[in-house]
Image (tube, rainbow, N blue to C red):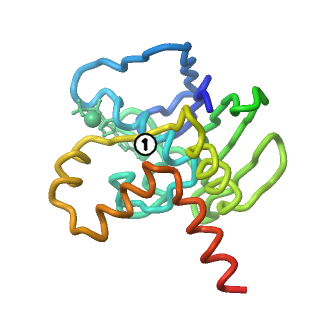
Amino acid sequence: MLIKQLRLSGFKSFVEPSTLRIEPGLTGVVGPNGCGKSNLLEAIRWVMGENSPKSMRSGGMEDVIFAGTATRPPRDFAEVVLSAQDDNGEDLEVVRRIERGAGSAYRVNGSDVRAKDVALTFADAATGAHSPALVSQGKIAQVIAAKPVERRMMLEEAAGIAGLHVRRRDAESK
Ligand code: ATP
Ligand code: MG
């Protein structure tokens, strides 16, 4: 899967709608401390269905919504649109939106879907040769310090078999 574009609105420090095109090849994000580099990576993880506020460096999921500054009022919602091309060359557009008091809603190619469908879409994509591997700040140290079970989960995620476990749990609960 190739991520081609990211559109953010009201997400963390990206208060105005911002579009980031990702060209083929290597992309570097540079800028001073606190300018929003990690927020960008978090936006990618978030639109892919991340549900742990902690991994968004937030207390609660609504904290990803622009909280306002001395000169700008807070926003009511955050939205991230990820445009990608899957391994079959098909376009894929995933939208996640969170509104204060209303939780998250997802759309894939224009249709409303469940969070689980989005998570599965990307869990499957990770089994492809061009797997998106997201390594966040501090994660390397975390791998070194992890307990064996946690480390196995990380390796399974990297090996692209996490999606199989999601399906197995789903099948077992039926
Ligand atoms: P570093 O180089 O230190 O890693 P960075 O470029 O990765 O910095 P980020 O951590 O992405 O920076 O951005 C942090 C900034 O985002 C802070 O200024 C913080 O106030 C802002 N921010 C985070 N969440 C929100 C929010 N909900 N509303 C407004 N601003 C936010
Ligand atoms: Mg950072």
Closest to the observer: 127 or 71? 127
State which quarter of the image contains the C terminus.
Answer: bottom right
Look at the numbered disc 1 and give the secondary structure of its residue. helix
Q: Judge: label 1 CB < 8 Å from ligand 1.
A: yes
The residue depicted at 66 percent of the width and 76 percent of the height is 170
Q: Which residue is mark 1?
A: 42
Determine whether, in the image, residue 90 is placed left or right of residue 151: right
Residue sticking out furthest to the right: 111
Could you tell me the amino acid type at mark 1? Glu
Determine whether, in the image, residue 30 is placed left or right of residue 131: left
Name above or below for residue 58 compared with residue 78.
Answer: below
Residue 39 is at least partly visible in this image: yes
Q: Give residue 167's position: percent from left, percent from top.
A: 65, 69
Name above or below for residue 113 compared with residue 74.
Answer: below
Determine whether, in the image, residue 39 is placed left or right of residue 121: left
Determine whether, in the image, residue 162 is placed left or right of residue 95: left
Closest to the observer: 107 or 4? 4
| Residues packed near mark 1 inside 10 Å, few (<14), some (14 to 19) or many (20 plus) | many
Q: Give residue 15's position: percent from left, percent from top.
A: 49, 33
Quarter of the image where one finds residue 3: top right
Closest to the observer: 38 or 155? 155
Name above or below for residue 81 compared with residue 47.
Answer: above
State which quarter of the image contains the N terminus.
Answer: top right
